[in-house]
Image (cartoon, rainbow, N blue to C red):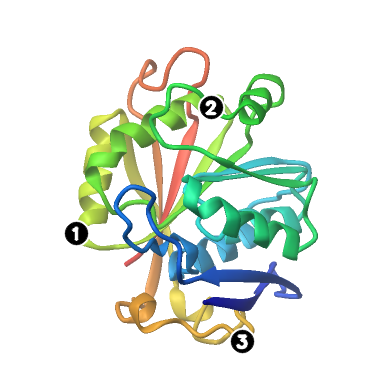
Amino acid sequence: MVRVRGIQVGATHQETLLIHELDDVCDTFTGRAMTGSWVWDSALLLSHYISTEFDLRGKTVLELGAGTGLPGLTASRLGADRVILTDVGPLLPGLRTNVEANGMCGRVEAYELVWGSDELPSRLTELVGEIGVDLVLMSDVFYDPSLMGAMTKTLKMVCGRETKIWAATEVRDSAVECLTELASHGFEAAELASRPLSQIIRDGSNCEDVGLSDSASSGLAEEAGIVAVAATEAGAVGAEHSVCSVAVCCSV
């Protein structure tokens, strides 16, 4: 089953993205249904945040664990020069469908990338080496502490000294455990700010014909907090590509 959602983005919410959600995407190895093909609250939050807090014009943006690609597509709609969406293989058809549905072929590309891989997709290697990535986006990625080592390995490969990394997640026990594990790999978090989640979602200003599913909204909190994460030591992220800062948006 395919469900198409129209989601308003931008500081004034005058741009609409068409997002296809697929119910029949399964993990290649386990056969289990994958939830990455649905729009979650954290993706809405991150899309809103980049619309108001970052000038994307002329930037190169990479989204890791992109799922439906909403934050990355938002970045393109708001003026980013280049956007690379990445996720595991089963989610790529849905990502590419959303790129095509929004007329972004040529400006937005989608590739398979498994965290912790020794090599990056050739196009991403080209961007990192010749241009550099200005902004890395991630939403709802802090759910399994055992993946943090692989995540940080990939971040070290794609980030330069001026790269910013913003991620959105709902606060839950596993997210806290992930941030703790992230610290063991040379990163630490500090809160920057908070904002009412209601102004993003409940007033409908960020969504048009988008209903939050019961599974996505049952734990909806009233505020969203922003924390910054930075490498704790000079060598923590490698000599060539040193992460300057990471910002994590959390529902609290």
Which residue is drawn at the image coordinates 65% and 54% (left, top)? 96
103 over 124 or under it: above or below = below
Where residue 225 is drawn, which disc sits there?
A: none
Considering the numbered disc 1 on the image, is that residue within a helix, a strand or a loop? helix
Nearest the viewer among 131 and 230 is 131
Image coordinates of residue 145 in percent, x first then y, are: 23, 44
Nearest the viewer among 23 and 132 is 23
In space, the residues marked 1 and 3 are separated at their CA atoms by 31 Å
102 over 180 or under it: above or below = below
Q: Residues within 10 Å of mark 2 (few under 14, many from 20)?
A: some
Where residue 120 is drawn, which disc sits there?
A: 2
Looking at the picture, which amino acid does disc 2 mark? Leu
Image coordinates of residue 210 in percent, x first then y, are: 56, 83
Q: Residues within 10 Å of mark 1 (few under 14, many from 20)?
A: few
**Residue placed under numbered mark 1 in the picture:** 173
In space, the residues marked 2 and 1 are separated at their CA atoms by 31 Å
Considering the numbered disc 3 on the image, is that residue within a helix, a strand or a loop? loop
Looking at the picture, which amino acid does disc 3 mark? Asp
Q: Earlier in the sequence, mark 2 or mark 3?
A: 2
Looking at the picture, which amino acid does disc 1 mark? Asp
Image coordinates of residue 164 in percent, x first then y, are: 54, 39
Q: Is residue 199 left or right of residue 114?
A: right
Where residue 209 is drawn, which disc sits there?
A: 3
